């Protein structure tokens, strides 16, 4: 069974701070996706990383895929209240396996 | 370009009843996957449909069944509902079995 562990489970920070959330597994994935989900809505795809060691930037968000394609991180610079939400990672190996997410709250 | 749509938005059922949820994929997508998301957890994979056949299945009992139609839309059926089936049911579509899935807004099912 493939498992994805996300940490921390909850994160509450002040506007302007930086943060990193992690997604770890003992399994190798052919790709990994990060999603952001608002309460009562479906997840929205942020990025897909495919190559080990790959780094992708999306404005203030930086995503990294581990060299062994087993883990990933999401770094947010100068967080804003609009970044508040549930951040989910999903590893793909024939089918998608999701972690339980990191709930981020950014206080103004 | 319409994204993934799901109906109904909310549903309340009684234990033991049966329910059908519907999903229309994003234009150009031919693969539909269904997920169950309990409160405070990540989505759990139920099954995936491609070319009107169940292609893969997660660890869900046979009470959960589905169907895909020639226009690629899909239904999720749950029989003999249990209280534990209360969750947000998400549909995601993709082109073939590529990993880039796009999710619908979900159907909130409450079983009383």
Image (cartoon, coloured by chain):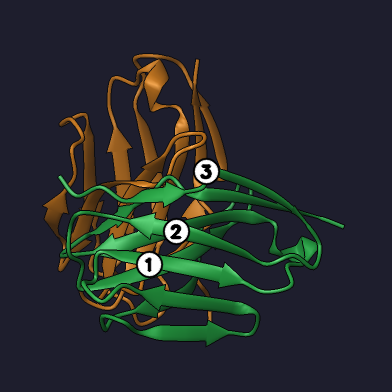
Chain colours: A green, B orange
As measured in the structure, the alpha-carbon distance from the residue carrying label 3 to the one carrying label 2 is 10 Å
As measured in the structure, the alpha-carbon distance from the residue carrying label 3 to the one carrying label 1 is 15 Å
Residue A96 picture location, percent across and down? 27, 59
Residue A35, above or below A42:
below
Residue at 31% across, 82% down: A53
Position of A105 with respect to A29 (left or right) is: right
Per the image, the residue denoted by label 1 is A72
Question: Callout 2: few (<14), some (14-19), or many (20+) C-alpha neighbours within 10 Å?
Answer: many
Which callout, 1 or 2, points at the residue further toward the start of the chain?
2
Per the image, the residue denoted by label 3 is A9
Question: Callout 3: few (<14), some (14-19), or many (20+) C-alpha neighbours within 10 Å?
Answer: some
C-beta proximity under 8 Å, tags 1 and 2? yes
Position of B52 with respect to B101 (left or right) is: left
Residue at 41% across, 17% down: B83
Give the chain letter at badge 1: A
Residue at 21% across, 67% down: A29
Residue B33 picture location, percent across and down? 29, 57
Q: Secondary structure at mark 3?
A: loop
**Could you say which is closer to the camera, residue A70 or residue B76?**
A70
| Residue B26 seen in render | yes
**Could you say which is closer to the camera, residue B106 or residue A80?**
A80
Q: Secondary structure at mark 1?
A: strand
Give the chain letter at badge 3: A
| Residue A42 seen in render | no
Per the image, the residue denoted by label 2 is A22
Position of A101 with respect to B95 (left or right) is: right
Question: Callout 1: few (<14), some (14-19), or many (20+) C-alpha neighbours within 10 Å?
Answer: many
Residue A24 picture location, percent across and down? 33, 56
Residue A15 picture location, percent across and down? 81, 62
Which callout, 3 or 1, points at the residue further toward the start of the chain?
3
Q: Secondary structure at mark 2?
A: strand
Which callout, 3 or 2, points at the residue further toward the start of the chain?
3
């Amino acid at each position: 069974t493939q498992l994805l562990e996300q940490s921390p489970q909850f994160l509450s920070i002040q506007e302007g701070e930086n943060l990193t959330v992690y997604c770890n597994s003992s399994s190798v994935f052919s790709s990994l996706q990060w999603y952001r989900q608002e309460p009562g809505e479906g997840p929205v795809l942020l990025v897909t990383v495919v190559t080990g060691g790959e780094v992708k930037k999306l404005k203030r968000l930086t995503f990294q895929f581990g060299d062994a394609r087993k883990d990933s991180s999401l770094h947010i610079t100068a967080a804003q209240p609009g970044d508040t939400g549930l951040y989910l990672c999903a590893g793909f190996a024939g089918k998608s396996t999701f972690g339980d997410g990191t709930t981020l709250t950014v206080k103004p | 370009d319409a994204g993934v749509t799901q109906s109904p938005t909310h549903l309340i059922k009684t234990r033991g009843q049966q329910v059908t949820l519907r999903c229309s994929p994003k234009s150009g997508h031919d693969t539909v996957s269904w997920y169950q998301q309990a409160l405070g957890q990540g989505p759990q994979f139920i099954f995936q449909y491609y070319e009107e056949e169940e292609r893969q299945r997660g660890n869900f009992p046979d009470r959960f069944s589905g169907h895909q139609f020639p226009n690629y839309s899909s239904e999720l059926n749950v029989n003999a509902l249990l209280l534990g089936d209360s969750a947000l049911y998400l549909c995601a579509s993709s082109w073939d079995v590529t990993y880039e899935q796009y999710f619908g807004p979900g159907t909130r099912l409450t079983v009383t």
